[in-house]
Amino acid sequence: MKVHDITGFLENLAPLHYQESYDNAGLLTGQFDMDITGAMISLDATEAVIDEAIKRKCNLVISHHPIIFKGLRKINGKNYIERAIIKAIKNDIALYAIHTNLDNVYDNGVSTEICDRLGLKNTRVLVPKLDADQEGKVGLGSIGDFDFVMNDTECLAFIKDRMEVKVIRHTALLESRIKTVAVCGGSGASLLPAAIAQGADMYISADFKYHEFFDANNEIIIADIGHFESEQFTIKLLHKILSKKFSNFALFCTSVNTNPVNYF
């Protein structure tokens, strides 16, 4: 098994040209013709994850977030990014990121996984990419409907349970009945206008800034569940996808919680 066998399969699922212009998905360290002994799947390619990969004899780490995101002018180990890169290169570990290209696909995509966990029906892409190869199947976020109607507090409790979150930051409750819900894994504040325009009663995402909560304008409830929390099940999603294709290959989900945010 070569690196390109895995990356080729993943890029057929989520082509690199689907990624956003600011992103850096793809093979970050290593060579495409490397023989793979095993793969570790994670949300972030931190030092701890690379240590776990070494222990498990995996020489490929597949992460959602690219450890190299902004330009690097020096690599001397002064921060967690540089230390992770140095460790990966020293130990001949390939680092591969499948980020906003996976966010932008509907089938087996990040937001669709959230919809599935919440049991939403009649799901569709929230903000389609109009120039995409597959019309209606590519774009950011998803929107769908519950089979049943809940009030807003019941819905927040349901989300906490299904998404396994400790805290939800939210806008004022509107004493509304929640039926249609929009979702976006990760930082999704920019998709709020689309969620409102499509009649969503609640929008589940992460990383809303203080002033951005005002943009709900009493038209929708924003439920900010946290960046890590909204994407944590991407690890299991990738494991499921890869296991179906490469059933006899050593694939592991990391046991490292890479969430840098703690709650007191």
Image: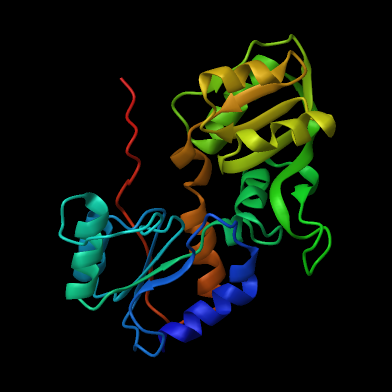
Residue 253's spot in the image, x, y percent?
A: 38, 61
Residue 212, image quadrant: top right
Does 95 sit left or right of 77 as displayed? right
- Residue 54 figure quarter: bottom left
Residue at x 67%, y 48% (from the top left corner): 116
Is residue 180 visible in the rendered structure shown here?
no
Q: Residue 105's quadrant in the figure? A: bottom right
> What number of labels is visible?
0
**Horizontal and vertical percent for residue 14?**
62, 68
Quarter of the rendering occupied by the C terminus: top left
**Which residue occupies the foreground of this view, 9 or 193?**
193
Residue at the extreme front: 73
Given residues 47 and 123, the one toward you in this image is 47
**Which is nearer the eye, 229 or 26?**
26
Q: Please tell me whether residue 248 is drawn above or below residue 146 in the rendered image.
A: below
Answer yes or no: is residue 252 visible. Answer: yes
Residue 144: image x %, image y %?
78, 40
The residue located at (69%, 17%) in the rendering is 152
Give the vertical position of 113 relative to 226 (above or below).
Answer: below
Q: Is residue 119 above or below residue 66?
A: above
Picture coordinates of residue 159 (x, y %)? 59, 30
Does residue 114 appear left or right of residue 22 in this picture?
right
Q: Is residue 30 left or right of residue 223?
A: left
Q: How is the image coloured?
A: rainbow
Task: Tell me what residue is drawn at x 24 percent, y 75 percent.
Answer: 57
For residue 246, above or below residue 111: below
In the image, taking residue 130 as reference, residue 225 lies left or right, namely left
| Quadrant into which the N terminus falls | bottom left
